[in-house]
Image (spheres, helix red, strand yellow):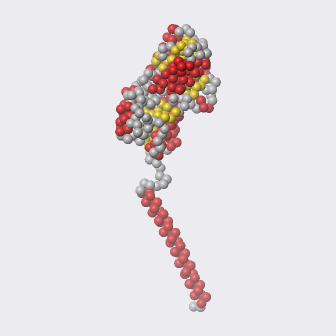
Amino acid sequence: MDAPLAFFIEFCHSDSAAFERKQMKKVLTIVAVASAMALVVGTGSAVNAAPKTLKIELISKGETHQFWQAVKKGAMDQAKKMGNVTVRFQGPATETMIDKQLEMLDGAIATKPDAIGYAALGTTEPLKHLAAANKKGIPVYMFDTAASCPGKLGVKSKCALGVAYTNSKAAGSLAADKMAGLIGSTGKVLVVGHSQTNQTGIDRASGFVNRIKAKYPNITLLETQYAEGGDQTKAQDIVAAALVANKDLKGIYGTNEGVSIGAGQAFKAANVAKGSIKLIGFDSGKQQMANIKDGLQSGAITQSPMGIGAKTVEALVNYVRNKTVPAPLIDTGFYYYDAKNITEPKIAGNLYE
């Protein structure tokens, strides 16, 4: 074999071996990476693995009322947004059924959920039940209405981490200022409350009453009456009697939707001229909003029900999943609305039918 040919053959063999070695390195690298990935997946530590699906129980003060349906929608939407969260929302038929609600709370605890959201109907009645959840290591965040928990809310509390709520005393105070403006800061006013047992009902009434007493000396407050649970028929009867007994009545403040609607019904039955007696209510709902647009009712305070539901779920998920401690108090806000501003975005976004 001559020298040039021998050199060419040697070159080819050398190049072929180098190529094979390079390809072998690629194969070994791929195998190593695949093995490492298999090991990670096998130990459940995949970087992009979906988080565990969390189970959250929400126990409200009611379920059929449109306000609670709005809270539920806010909660469900937030659960979907955060991903891998299931929510069961339930409440008693009426807001007077404390025992039934506590049965639901006990039932929720028994299912061993990842977390519980709770809207208190009673002030002290729920405490031992909340303590039972705490003992089982189930975090609780209250919404709308807090129980009268001893000490401060937070991680050291045996009651709850906190509460997403409307500052009901401040909301009642705003309603008082609006009423005073409507009646010229003088005359008789009747407060019709919806509860003497849950803190929200108590605060909405006391916030109004205390503001009137402190700032408007020429307004005479009649004795506060109650239509427990927001019973429309009872509210209608109370207002009808007040209209007969007080021909010079200037205003009525109803602390929830049912009471406000009942008062409007009494106005209609007595043929009260629209606007002659001022009526300020609370929350929204199809009938109450219609009464405001029609001039039968002056206005109302709206909360952010969907915000209450959303903030509750957000607080619980972040605490369980990310160990982020929520604020002990999350104020979800409130607004006064009437026929003039009912369609404004910040108002309309917080109303429900």
Residue drawn at (47%, 46%) of the image: 322
Q: Which residue lies furthest to the bottom in this view?
A: 2
Q: In which quarter of the image is the C terminus?
A: top right
Residue 11 in the image: state x and y as whole percent.
Answer: 57, 82
Residue 68 in the image: state x and y as whole percent.
Answer: 48, 30
Q: Which residue lies furthest to the right in this view?
A: 340
Q: Is residue 87 above or below residue 94?
A: below
Compared across the picture, whether 344 is left or right of 333 comes to: right
Specify the quadrant of the image occupied by residue 271.
top right
Residue 278 in the image: state x and y as whole percent.
Answer: 58, 16
Q: Is residue 79 above or below residue 186?
A: below
Residue 291 can be seen, yes or no: no
Residue drawn at (47%, 36%) of the image: 328
Q: Quadrant of the N terminus?
A: bottom right
Residue drawn at (47%, 44%) of the image: 324
| Depth check, front residue: 219 or 117 | 219
Residue 251 in the image: state x and y as whole percent.
Answer: 56, 15
Residue 324 can be seen, yes or no: yes
